[in-house]
Amino acid sequence: MKKYNIQNFVLFILLVFMGTACKDFLKEESISNITTDSYVVNEAGYEDLVKSCYPLLRDYILNYALVLPGTDLFQAGNWNLKVVGDGPYLDQYDIRFNSSAGEVQAFWDILYRNIGRTNAAIGRADAITYVDPAKKAARVAEAKFIRALSYFYIVQTWGDAPIPLTETIAADKAVVRVPSASIYTQILKDLTDAETALPVTATDYGRVTKGAAQFLLSRVYLTRGWNYKSGLGGVATDFKSALDYADKVIAAYPLVAQYKTLFPTRTNNPLIQYTGAQNDKNTEVVFPIQYNADALTNAMEVPYPSTATREPGNYYHSIFPGNGELVGNAGRTSDYNRSLGQNQPTPASYRFFDPQKDSRYTHDFVNAVWALKAVSGYAYSYTDASLKVSYAVGDTVAYWTPWNKPATATQKGIDEGGTKKYAVMNLDQMVSGVAISRLTAATPSMWKFWQPGITYGDGYGTFDFALFRSAEAYLLAAEAILKGAGNGTLGGAEVYYNKVLDRAVGAGVDPQRAKYPEDLTSFETVSYRATAATISLDMVLDESGRELFGEFNRWFDLKRTGKLIERAKKYNFWTKAKGVPSDNSLVRPIPQSEIDRSAPSITQNPGY
């Protein structure tokens, strides 16, 4: 395991938390003599040490490649039923996903780097005197929470793993994998210690609070209760503990009235001028990962051993598919920004929603592209040069129909014998691999996190990322009840489930999803409102998919519940067509670089 001496990041601490006081900081004087031992000697120095544990959380969520693709909701590549050869290895779980994969190396290094920082903060606390002892206890608790969160991601991703609990002062090649059950014991110890000392309201917004510890305790107890391969040390009361902590979070963090207000204020048409209003500090957010408009303090660190620069800001607005660069485009602008297409919603994922009744579908997907500049006499057919169209600014260029209301022949574009002067695509055409016209865009934009007004670039979003929000606590509670926890404060599992659904569709509304989401030829529907008789684990996972679509949780949820292989094979196009997932796919490979730099070499997970 790469050993990180905290002396290497003291300067980074100062840069990140000096904020806008850069002029005062950038003086012509040598500060090379500052070391950890000379800086972290009093309350002010210790405050900066604890603060240094927070910025790396931004890098955690950048490892979305290990959380979104390869699941039932997202794929790493575009749909194309005509494809020849292999598809993305993150979806196929084949031999290409091995110990040399950059994704596992990056996640491993960034997690252990932060564990090094939290260990230093926890270990050095006894030597620091605070005016207010409760404040000091809270700071230690913050470090314990972040350490517990880091180890929780590690044990879910790799299973048995090294678990250093003291500050690393010198390099050491001896690395020992600790059993998963012991890691869970340590995680729960850190979190229960943290819950006791943390305040209900943080001294500074964005710090860890009692509610954040309770949320993570709920998720950890729920995961341990499932007792993956009987190796997590789960006990019968874990599900009850998960429910009790979820109830505490629900009571303290009320849901906001509308789903769309959790995200930057916008409409789906970029031609409308936006205020870009932020609502990231709302009652539902239990623990945010913070961003801001300062390029210096918003920068993220680079995973070892890369020397490349990391783009600053929250760029979840651009890691999903879409295409604003059709005819009439004005280049990549703040109107559409970039769309990397890295996390392609599966064909089935659209069919889990009722497009007409579920406000989350309306917010998450943009079903049209509009011209940003006028175009005259554009020949857009591949086969008929006489078919020409002209567009004014704001005219529709491409339109994707909702899955349950496909366009008829006359409702299609003129290139397909219809009457529309823009491309019209049904869901089955999106996955056919057949180009319809020069106007065709592969799939609708997934704009759940889109922030208006960002100058085109590689990121620069300033919206906080809600790592925990109370809507998820309702679904954790429902899952715990289904696993035998007994009813919670609000009642049965269906009550918790429907509380989240009601916000999206309205109380008493009966939304309909595709009964067979995996079969694009079927338009048979089924209600996804729960009753005591119908509520099931798959319903809870479906609702979690709709509510938390694209958030940093899906692979972990499916692994925890033992549903990853079943649902990926059923709903993920690439996994279904060519995937070879097995039980070994439920843990990731230990990075080869970690094996190479350890002595004796750390053991690899089975199957890799």
Image (cartoon, grey):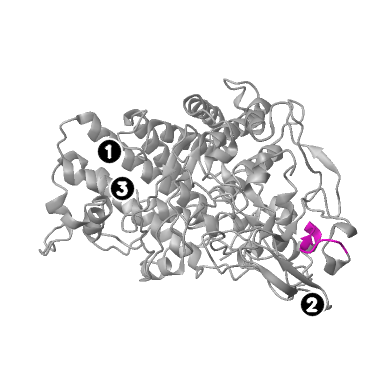
Tell me where residue 168 sits by quadrant.
bottom left
Q: Regarding mark 2 in the picture, which secondary structure is present there?
A: loop
The residue under label 3 is 118
Assign the C terminus to one quadrant of the image.
Answer: bottom right
Q: Regarding mark 1 in the picture, which secondary structure is present there?
A: helix
Q: Residue 233: where, in percent of width, then height? A: 50, 39
| Residue interval drawn in magenta | 418-428
Asked if the residue at tag 3 contacts the one at tag 1, i.e. Cβ–Cβ closer than 8 Å, the answer is no
The residue under label 1 is 139
Name the kind of residue labelled 1 in the image.
Arg
Assign the N terminus to one quadrant of the image.
Answer: bottom left
Q: Toward the viewer: 38 or 78?
A: 78
Q: Regarding mark 3 in the picture, which secondary structure is present there?
A: helix
Q: Residue 234: where, in percent of width, then height? A: 53, 37
Marks 2/3: CA–CA distance: 59 Å
> 563 above or below 398?
above
Mark 3 Cα shell of 10 Å, populated few (<14), some (14-19), many (≥20):
many
Q: Toward the viewer: 599 or 421?
A: 421
Marks 1/2: CA–CA distance: 64 Å
Name the kind of residue labelled 2 in the image.
Tyr
Chain-order first, disc 1 or disc 2? 1
Q: Residue 151: where, in percent of width, then height? A: 42, 48
The residue under label 2 is 382
Asked if the residue at tag 2 contacts the one at tag 1, i.e. Cβ–Cβ closer than 8 Å, the answer is no
